[in-house]
Image (cartoon, coloured by chain):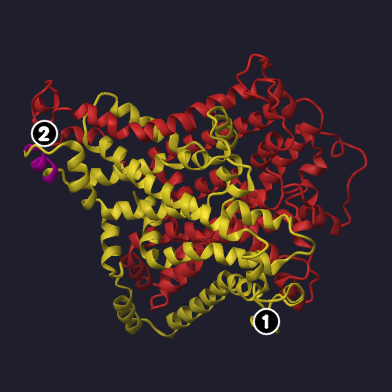
Chain colours: A yellow, B red
Amino acid sequence: MTAVDVSAESGIPNDDAPKRSFRRRKRLGARARTGMLLSYLILIGLALIYIYPFIISIAASFKTDAEATQDALSLIPDTITFAAYERLFGDVPFPLWAGNTVMIATIVTLGRVFFDSLAGYALSRLKFKGRAFVFAAFIGILSVPGVVLLIPRFLILQQLGLYDTYGGMIIPLLSTAAGVFIMKQFFDSIPVSVEEAARIDGASTFRIYWTIVLPMARPALVTLFILSFQGSWNELGHFIVSRQSPELNTLTTGVASLVSGQLGSGNQFPLQLAAAVLMTIPVAILFFIFQRRIMNTTAGAEKG
Amino acid sequence: MTRRTAKPVPRTAVRPRRGGGIRRGEARSGWLFVAPAVIITTVFLVIPIMLAFWVSVSDWNGFQSPLNPRVNFVGLENYAAITVEDGLDQRNFGTAVRNNFYYVLFVVPLQTIIALLLAVQVNRAVLRGKGFFRTAFYFPSVTSTVAIVIVFQFLFTASGAVNAVIGALGIDGPDWFNDSTGVFHALLGSFGVTAPSEGPLAEPGFLGISGWQWIAGPSVAMSSLIMLAIFTTSGTFMLLFLAALQNIGSEIDEASLMDGAGPVRKFFSITLPMLRPTLFTVLTLGLIGSWQVFDQIYVLGGTSAGGTISTPAFLAYRSSFVDLQWGQGAAIAFILFVFIIVLTLLQRWALAERTPKKFRQSKATPKVQGGLR
């Protein structure tokens, strides 16, 4: 993972594709070139299938209800209207949902980065009785499927009196076994010598962690930051079972309630699509800023 | 883990002599550092699962605490109600299992094949477009399921974009998300085979579902969700294949071309065998993930299309939170839990068997993937 991350950070493409292609094209004949052309045609066709739905959805969010229903394919609305967006900021408490999501995602992300790196560091570096057991337990927990936690989470929040509070929505998400695991793997891969020097100088464990280890761990922290932000921004299940008050709706639960058509008759596609577009923008921005790292992380997870 | 013990620390310093040495207080810091993660995991994961197990063998109805003295132990009654006792609960569970079975049957192979196709094509794209295509195929994977469901409902509505496109080809498209017709039933129907009124296929069979209903195939509504799943996951799996393809490198590529192997032959006799570990990972991850489908179903309400899009995960939620049959909901969740854990253990065991040490680290892949989605 680290090797991949380094190339990602410096922004250097991690393959020498253009050079290779040049060599290859000289050597290969017309048949190969036809093959390449065919490959591109397939790719462009597939890319259209993947992108076009998003484009016509954005277009439809500026259409009238009737036009969105009758003429779904057109890219340019006959009459451009901002009615859907106006309704989102008028009748629909969209800003409230967005505010909740921003707050929860921020706290959850910071919490995960802090607690998971702390635990990952301890499991990688510090010697203490029970360390092997704690690590084995985290590995076991990795395989607990998230979807079966819905009922258990509700039960415990109710027992603790945290149901339908911000605390109940946030605290259970503050640490994940996967995050601990990622950080532990990372610390295993960086040399220990700098810390040893600081330790001989008499620095406390927390100071070593805070001033020496964390700055070195930046690539892994950024990875964990992205994963956590995206995960908590898109989280739906936990917010279904941890709250019921409308004031605690997040973007996911709020926008999901639009789909079930609680707001009057008709399909209201422009309104729903406008909400979908707006809720996607922050994740999309994050994705485009960090896309190389995000995609390398996914691939890296498999390579180990 | 074990490798770390070999780090260059004098053995004497590891034993903490109280009050001295450079590793003084290390045990305390160690526990302090893992404490937040351990406490959160214990309180919000381990204890809740035990609590839910109690609920699954109790007659708790959702009022007051499940631990109050008026709640009784009922043994396996809740499990029996959904699996062996004839009745609506059993049929609902059976239908959900059937729906999810067909979902898995189509999603897992299709998303694997499409992810592989995308990866091979993107990998061949030697010009500048590579990054663009990779981004285009991966973007749906980072988007919220709620947003994707909205987009798909819009695309697949009766007068929507999909029907407009296939209408141009002269095909009359269905009202996708509201059509409960089983695809296999429709296929059989086109050969004149219709529902039998008697005989073995008409009798209630496994989980209270008749044989005829078992062979229904995914409904048209479920088929839309199958396409949705493929749309959102193929990008993620494409990246896994892409990483593996880049590891294979271009030497083998060019060598086989020089040897005169055609691209198709090369793919099946050289590339595919080398991709086997990744292929296995993608298939099992897909298997584990697609038995957990919940978000899409919840957003769509879960009871539309004649109950043909309900899944065990959604039924567990609905039985508990809507019908207040907490025992049965928890029982369904536990059956699902055990089933998925078994799949995961099989995967880990097989990966550890077939690959040397280095690959074993991919144990973590399931949850890391989950995070990414």
Q: Is residue B329 above or below residue B150?
A: above
Q: Which mark is residue A77?
A: 1
How would you rate the neighbour count of disc 2 (Cα within 10 Å): few for under 14, some for 14-19, many for 20 or more? few
Residue at mark 2 to residue at mark 1: CA–CA distance? 70 Å
Q: Which range is magenta? A: A194-200
Asked whether B150 or A159 is in front, the reply is A159
Q: Provide the secondary structure element on which disc 1 rests.
A: loop
Q: Is A195 inside the magenta-drawn segment?
A: yes
Q: Is residue B178 left or right of residue B259?
A: right
Q: SS class of the residue under badge 2?
A: loop
- Which residue appears at 68% of the width and 62% of the height? A91
For residue B155, say whether it is visible.
no
Mark 2 or 1: in front is 1
Q: Residue at x 54, y 40 (%)?
A: A165
Q: From the viewer's perspective, tell me whether residue B252 is left or right of residue A282.
A: left
Residue type at numbered disc 2: Val
As rendered, which of A39 and B318 lies closer to the eye?
B318
Q: Are marks 2 and 1 on the same chain?
A: no
Q: Which residue is mark 2?
A: B9
Rendering coords of residue A242 (x, y %): 57, 40
The quadrant of the rendering that contains the N terminus of chain B is top left
Q: Chain of mark 2?
A: B
Q: Nearer the viewer, residue B150 or A301?
A: B150
Residue B232 falls in which quadrant of the image? Answer: bottom right
Q: Residues within 10 Å of mark 1 (few under 14, many from 20)?
A: some
The percent coordinates of residue B56 (x first, y second) are 64, 25
Percent across and percent down for residue A146 are 53, 40
* Relative depth, front residue between A74 and B122: A74
Q: Is residue A242 magenta?
A: no
Give the image quarter of residue B144: bottom right
